[in-house]
Amino acid sequence: MRKSKAFWTGTLGVALFVFTTFLGGLLDPKYSHTSQFISELYADNAGHADFLRFFGYIPSGILFSLFSVFAIMETPKSTLRTVGFLGIGIGYGVGTIICGFFNCDTDCNPYFINPSSSQIIHNFVGFITYTICPPAIFLLGFSARKWRKGNTLSNISFALSLLSFCFFGLLNANLHSPYKGLIQRVLEGSILLWILYCSYYLLKLKRTP
């Protein structure tokens, strides 16, 4: 039985990211998944920030980066495939790692008053991550059309790319919305769901003669 490294790194990355987010919420009874950003779980003043950063989010970012590398190795060669997976690996993988190292200020400094250099880097990289990932998934939707039994992945890629793009726009339209946490989770969830399904597809691709 041939194993897919992309499957394991992608699946474990998603599981670790989601588990860390839920765990962070459980550790802080006052935290709201509806109204607060994920980054607030490991902000400068958060009680379990270092634990969540170094044992949850940063390792998940490493796994996402590895998923991208292995996915490139396990799929047919094309420029769209390479650009798309590099977008995921750099945008979501490296982006998650950098945001983990450079966490935001107390309560993520919602009004950006005298931000620290760490806050500035965190916000900039987060914006770049959300800017890169939807187009990367969209490009991979086109590329998957030429892969073996890749039509379903292609359609899912187009749908999740559009969903993530729309919620990115909705998030930026009102960063102080009482539902900003929920909006961000739909955005993040669309990317994570794509990684999860793509991982499953690559496992089937690896096992099919």
Image (cartoon, rainbow, N blue to C red):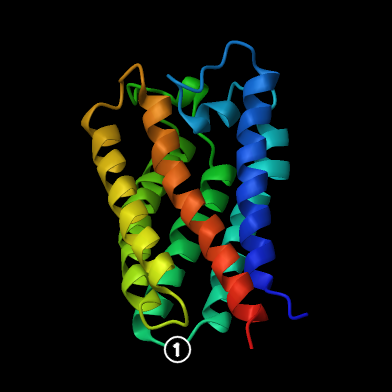
x and y percentages locating residue 103 in the rendered image: 54, 37
Say left or right for 128 vs 166.
Answer: right
User: Does residue 29 sit above or below 203 in this rendering?
Assistant: above
Mark 1 residue type: Lys
Q: Nearer the viewer, residue 79 or 11?
A: 11
In the picture, which quadrant includes the C terminus?
A: bottom right
In the rendered view, does 201 fall on the left or right side of 120? right
Q: Mark 1 packing: few (<14 Cα in 10 Å), some, or many (20+)? A: few
The structure residue drawn at horizontal position 58% and vertical position 72%, both measured from the top left corner, is: 202
Q: Is residue 152 left or right of residue 48?
A: left
**Closer to us: 4 or 92:** 4
Check the picture and name the quadrant holding the N terminus.
bottom right
**Residue 61 in sight in this render:** yes
Q: Which residue is mark 1?
A: 77
Q: Position of residue 176 (x, y in %)?
A: 31, 21
Farthest top residue? 30
Q: Residue at x 64, y 80 (%)?
A: 206
From this viewpoint, is residue 94 visible?
no
Q: Secondary structure at mark 1?
A: loop
Give the residue at x 67% y 37%: 19
Relative to residue 150, is residue 31 depicted above or below? Answer: above
Quadrant of residue 135 within the rendered picture:
bottom left
Q: Residue at x 36, y 52 (%)?
A: 160
- In this figure, what is the number of numbered marks? 1
- 152 is higher (above) or lower (below) than 106: below
Coordinates of residue 119 in the picture (x, y in percent):
44, 35
Instruction: Name which quarter of the figure residue 44 lies in.
Output: top right
Q: Pick out the residue farthest to the left.
A: 173
Residues 188 and 86: in front is: 188
